[in-house]
Image (cartoon, rainbow, N blue to C red):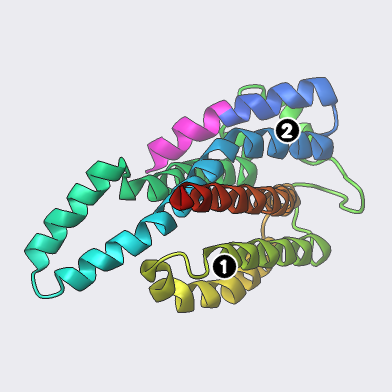
């Protein structure tokens, strides 16, 4: 696992160092770095949303099969696979983007928690990570309240958006709804508590990344509504 994290963190470290060489302000560099990373991850978010909409389209057909073959699990599984093949739908396609994001997130955390482990240009960066930014006097040290609270708040809003987007999408989501509701409150509090011990640079990344994610969610919600409308039009035809 550590090798995988290092494999991802090192090129991210090169990008961070490259940006700092041109910007010469570590705080602004972190904002630019976060924006670039989130933009690169956007296709995964979009793919996940499209898969979720596609799954919702499949629900009526799947419920019909479940009703028809309620007492024959083997036939139900076979018919479900046939339905997936006919509709050219891969049920794992919604999970794949999330799985691809996880090692990237771990790599980012490893890099920003201890940048010097993954930097090639250690001379300039050794000074850079101790720079001040706004009210934070040293970005390598924790900010006790403002950034952690901001990170927790944006995390809560992002989780709430995701919960609202997934409501009623499938039976599976309905089963996971209690866990999602718990995570919506627990995870932001955890981020706030951990943010008080993380270097301020890492907390800036998380806060700004969540702020961008909120904007992504607003846009992707519009995309989801458009895809649903197109799907309804196709059904009517």
Q: Residue at x 79, y 41 (%)?
A: 130
Residue 220 versus residue 159 in the image, above or below: above
Q: Residue at x 60, y 67 (%)?
A: 164
Q: Position of residue 183 (x, y in %)?
A: 54, 72
Q: Is residue 28 left or right of residue 182?
A: right
Q: In this view, does 209 lie to the left or right of 90?
A: right
Q: Which residue is drawn at 75% across and 38% down?
A: 30
Quadrant of res 189: bottom right
Residue 40 versus residue 82 in the image, above or below: above
Q: Position of residue 194 (x, y in %)?
A: 63, 64
Quadrant of res 100: top left
For the N terminus, the quadrant is top left
- Furthest-right residue in view? 134
Q: Name the residue under label 1.
A: 163
Q: Where is residue 14 in the image (x, y as percent from the top left)?
A: 62, 24
Q: Nearer the viewer, residue 70 or 128?
A: 70
Q: How many marks?
A: 2
Give the prevailing secondary structure in the magenta stretch: helix
Q: Nearer the viewer, residue 55 or 159?
A: 55
Instruction: Report the span colored magenta.
Output: 1-11
Q: In this view, does 45 lie to the left or right of 85?
A: right
Q: Name the residue under label 2.
A: 126
Kind of element beneath mark 1:
helix
Near mark 1 (Cα within 10 A), the count class, few <14, some 14-19 or many ≥20, is some
């Amino acid at each position: 696992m550590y090798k995988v994290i290092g494999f991802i963190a090192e090129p991210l470290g090169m990008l961070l160092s490259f940006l700092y060489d041109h910007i010469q302000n570590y705080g602004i560099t972190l904002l630019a770095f976060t924006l670039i990373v989130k933009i690169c991850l956007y296709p995964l978010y979009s793919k996940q949303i499209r898969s979720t909409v596609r799954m919702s389209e499949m629900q009526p057909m799947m419920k019909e099969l479940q009703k028809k073959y309620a007492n024959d699990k083997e036939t139900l599984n076979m018919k479900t696979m046939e339905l997936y093949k006919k509709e050219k739908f891969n049920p794992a396609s919604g999970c794949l983007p999330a799985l691809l994001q996880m090692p990237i997130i771990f790599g980012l955390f490893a890099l920003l928690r201890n940048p010097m482990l993954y930097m090639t240009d250690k001379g300039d960066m050794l000074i850079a990570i101790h720079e001040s930014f706004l009210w934070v006097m040293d970005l390598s040290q924790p900010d006790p309240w403002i950034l952690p609270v901001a990170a927790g708040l944006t995390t809560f809003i992002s989780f709430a958006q995701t919960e609202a987007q997934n409501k009623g999408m499938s039976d599976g989501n309905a089963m996971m709804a209690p866990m999602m509701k718990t995570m919506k409150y627990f995870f932001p509090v955890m981020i706030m508590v951990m943010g008080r011990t993380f270097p301020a640079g890492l907390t800036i990344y998380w806060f700004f990344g969540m702020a961008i994610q909120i904007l992504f969610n607003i846009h992707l919600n519009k995309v989801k509504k458009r895809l649903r409308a197109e799907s309804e039009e196709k059904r009517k035809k």
